Amino acid sequence: MIKISAEKFLWKIVLVGDGAVGKTSLRKRYLGEGFDSDYLSTMGADFALYDTEIGDKQIRWQIWDLAGQPMFKDVVQSYYTKIFGGVLVYDVTRRQTFENVEKWLNDLWENSGRDKKVPIVLIANKIDLREEGAESVSSDEGKAFAEKLGVFFLETSAKTGEGVENAFAQLGKDILQYTS
């Protein structure tokens, strides 16, 4: 943990995953900024600060929302350095975003400078849009994959807010355990 003052710590985290999986919407929902259904691609990276309390610690999240489009790959990798945690996101309605999760995770681990010790929360987003079908990713598939990777798994809807607070709370608990 980076100590800001005697009482407050700074944690740099990243939100990663393919484009249009809902990373920005999840961040905005967590920050209390609501939900906007208009999609605007993140150009490189977006940044926000958020103060909260986890356990008995005052935490300032430094949240980096990284672009998921391939054209930003080289730029995005530099944002992984010195992170304390990551939120890895896929869209349950687009199987390809799920299939790309391992690539994102490997990029994060390789570029973080912390090897495979970075706490990660895997988020299946857009559950409000999930329909049974060939493209949809089931809850069981997400859970099994997270278990294989050894990361925590949650399903969320940035639109309704379901699971969003829990995702960041879990990441906070994992980071506390990692840094203690």
Image (cartoon, rainbow, N blue to C red):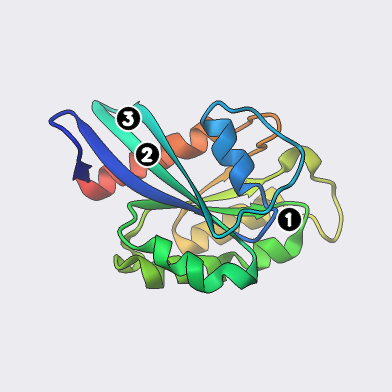
- Which residue: 63% across, 31% down? 162
* Residue found at the far left of this picture: 6
Residue carrying label 1 = 137
Residue 136 point in image, percent of width and height? 79, 55
Q: CA distance from mark 2 to mark 1?
A: 30 Å
Residue 143 point in image, percent of width and height? 59, 52
Viewer-side residue, 10 vs 96:
10
- Which residue: 53% across, 32% down? 30
The amino acid at mark 1 is: Val
Decide: few, some or many residues near mark 1? Use Cα within 10 Å; few <14, some 14-19, many ≥20.
many
Say which mark, if any, is on residue 108.
none
Left or right: residue 141 versus residue 132 is left
* Residue found at the far front of this picture: 43
65 lies above or below 113: above
Left or right: residue 120 versus residue 1 is right
Left or right: residue 158 versus residue 49 is right
Say which mark, if any, is on residue 54.
3
Residue carrying label 2 = 61
The amino acid at mark 3 is: Ile
